[in-house]
Amino acid sequence: MRYLVTASLVAVLIASEARPAAAQDPAAAARIATDGVEIVTGLMDFDLAGTGQAMPFVFRVSRSVATRLALEFDVTMASPDQQFGSSQILLTEGKASWSWRIGRVRPFVSGGGGVMAQNMLTEIRWRPTFTGGGGARIGITDNLYAIAEMRLRGISTDFSASTAEWLGGVGWRLR
């Protein structure tokens, strides 16, 4: 019985070990780049096989690798109407993002590349993409933030197609 009480007391003491809160973690306080998950939408002006506007939906994950530098992976989906009719595009891209901090606002610039799959009437076309842009993440609470972004994308190695996007959404800070 004494062994059971001692083991229970040790287990309780180990489980209740004091750990610093995220606000007290000096590494988290110094970090400017964002570790987060974001859902973003907005307006996409496109010049693919025809020109026009579409509403993209973006899911993004970012991971800070240095104080100001983060790596981002995003998936963008849109259904632009083109000369031959409606099509669906799926863009997967990796980007590097450099951030600053001005109070609750974290302006950033980003650039990277990826691949676009375009589902046309009878075929799926795969083309490389190159992206550059910038924007700001605005803290709402400790973990929740709003995001506003503008980016330009060149499609194919000769930039024979392009998109310009004005985006806004919300994100959740993971650390």
Image: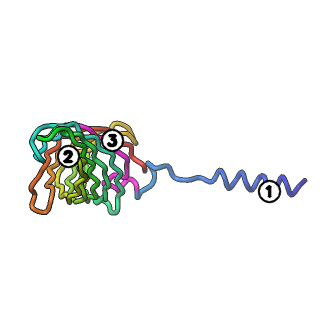
Label 2 element class = strand
**Does residue 104 appear in this view?**
no
Which residue corresponds to mark 1?
7
Q: Nearer the viewer, residue 43 or 35?
A: 43
Q: Nearer the viewer, residue 28 or 66?
A: 66
Q: Is residue 27 above or below residue 55?
A: below
Quarter holding residue 128: bottom left
Residues under labels 1 and 3: Cα distance? 46 Å
Lower position in the chain sequence, tag 1 or tag 3: 1
Which residue corresponds to mark 2?
135
Q: Residue 33 at x, y = what percent?
A: 31, 54
**Numbered mark located on residue 39 in the image:** 3
Which amino acid type is marked by label 3?
Ile
Q: Residue drawn at (65%, 50%), measured in percent from left and top? A: 16
Q: Residue 133 at x, y = what percent?
A: 17, 51
Which amino acid type is marked by label 1?
Ala
